[in-house]
Image (spheres, rainbow, N blue to C red):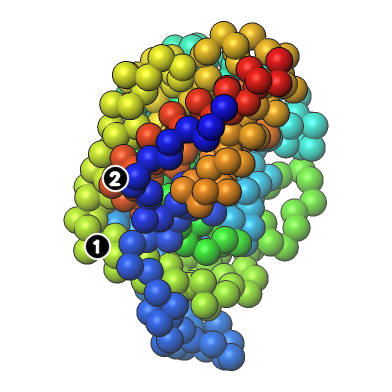
Amino acid sequence: MSELTKPAARPANPRFSSGPCSKHPGHSLDNLKNAFLGRSHRAPEGLARLALAIDRTSDLLGLPEGYRLAIVPGSDTGAMEMALWSLLGARGVDMLSWESFGRTWTTDIVDQLKLDDVRVLETEYGELPDLSKVDFTRDVVFAWNGTTSGVRVPNGDWIADDRQGLTICDATSAAFAQDLDWPRLDVTTFSWQKALGGEAGHGMLVLSPRAVERLESYTPPWPMPKVFLLTKNGKLAEKVFRGATINTPSMLCVEDWLDTLDWAHSVGGLEGLMARADANTAAITAWVEKTAWVEFLGRVPESRSNTSVCLKIVDPAVADLPGDEQRAYVARFAGLLDEEGVAYDIASHRNAPPGLRIWAGATVETSDLAALMPWLDWAYKRVSSTATQAA
C-alpha cells in the first residue's frame, strides 16, 4: 500500500509537550543578556531581581491582599512537598485523587508522613470525585487541574467559605490559564516550566493569611529538612517571601521568567493568557467533535482541562486491545509525528490510560494546533493501515 498523502501545512512550532512546555512566541536567548550572573543572589541587585519576579507574578495572578508568594526549590513538586510536610498533621485530611499527581500526594500523606486520619476520595482518570463529600472541617489536598487526566475542577464554588481546615492546591497546570478562586485557596503551588514555559527547577508557593497562621501556631512532629523551613523562631520567615530564597536559585532562569512575564503582559495579562488557552482548546474540540476515532478522556465538558488536553482512541480496533498493545499503538502513533517534526511528546503520561496528551496553554499558537489536527488523522490512518497489513 502506498504512503498516505501527508497534510500540506505543518505547525510552525511542533512543541506540544505538557512539561516542560513550549517557550512563549518570540522567545530568544538574547532577551537574557542582562541576567545577574556570576554574583551572589543575596547581593542587593540579585535580591531585587528575585523580589521583582515575585511581585510581578503576584500582580499577574491578582493575588489578594495579605497573600504571600515565594520562590522555592524543586519546581511544583518541591513546593507541594514543602506545603504537605510543613502544614499537615494538625487536622484530619481529605485527599482528592483522580490522576497521577493526586496519587503521588496521597502516597506522601499516607506512606511517608504516615498520618492516621486520612480520607482518600479517589476516582478513575477522566472523572472527578464527588466534591460534595469533601469535609472542610479537615485539611483538603487536591490538584486544580489534573495534568495527566485532562480533568479539572470547574470552579471553586464547592469549597466552603467557612472552612476550618486549609485547602492545599497543586495548581501547576492551571495557573495562568484557569480562573483560580484565590479567596478559597490557602496554599497554592505551581512551577515556571509548566503553564508559561519557563525553565525547570523553580517552584512557587502561595500562602493565605490562614496558612501563615497555621505555620506560626503548629509544629509538625517530624524532622524538617532545611529546604522546607518556612519559619524561624516560631514566626514566618518573611525574607523568603521577599526574594531571600532558601537555596541558591538560577539567576538565568529568573531572567527567563521575567522575560516570560513581559510577554504575558504583552498579550493582555491573565485574561489574555486564559483566552489564548481557551482558543487553543476550542481548536482541538472542533476537530474531536467531527472525528469518529477519538474522544476526550474527560467525559464532562465543564471539567475538561484547557491546558493538558487528554484524548482517548475509541476505535474498537484499538480500544479493545490489551493495555500493552494499546500503548505500543500510541507509541507508534506519536513516534510518526515526532519523525515528521510536526508534534513532539504527545503520548499520554506513563501512568495514564493509553492515548494522546496535547498541551494547549497560552504559549502555544492556535494556528499550530489547527495545523496539527490533520496530522493526527494522517497518523491514525497510517498506523491503523500498518496494523491491518501486519494482521
Query: Left or right: where does residue 115 sit relative to residue 155?
Result: right
Question: Does 62 appear above or below 136?
Answer: below
- Label 2 sits on a secondary structure element that is helix
Amino acid type indicated by mark 2: Thr
Tell me the distance, in whole angstroms, between the alpha carbons under discs 2 and 1. Answer: 19 Å
Residue carrying label 2: 366
Question: Does 25 appear above or below 288?
Answer: below
Q: Where residue 84 appears, x then y in whole percent? A: 64, 42
- Label 1 sits on a secondary structure element that is helix
Disc on res. 157:
none
The residue sitting at 58% across, 91% down in the picture is 38
Query: Left or right: where does residue 154 sit relative to residue 266?
Result: right
Label 2 or label 1, whichever lies nearer to me, is 2
Q: Where residue 35 appears, x then y in whole percent? A: 46, 84
The residue sitting at 62% across, 26% down in the picture is 386
Quadrant (top left, top right, bottom left, bottom right) of the C terminus: top right
Residue 32 lies in quadrant: bottom left
Residue 287 lies in quadrant: top left
Residue 75 at least partly seen? yes
Residue carrying label 1: 265
Residue 141 at least partly seen? no
Q: Where residue 68 appears, x then y in whole percent? A: 42, 56
Query: Which residue occupies the foreground of this view, 305 or 47?
Result: 305
Query: Left or right: where does residue 123 sit relative to residue 179?
Result: right
The residue sitting at 52% across, 13% down in the picture is 315
Query: Left or right: where does residue 101 sit relative to residue 12?
Result: right
Query: Which residue occupies the foreground of this view, 389 or 310?
Result: 389
Question: Does 180 appear above or below 273?
Answer: above
Query: Which residue occupies the foreground of this view, 380 or 279?
Result: 380
Quadrant (top left, top right, bottom left, bottom right) of the N terminus: top right
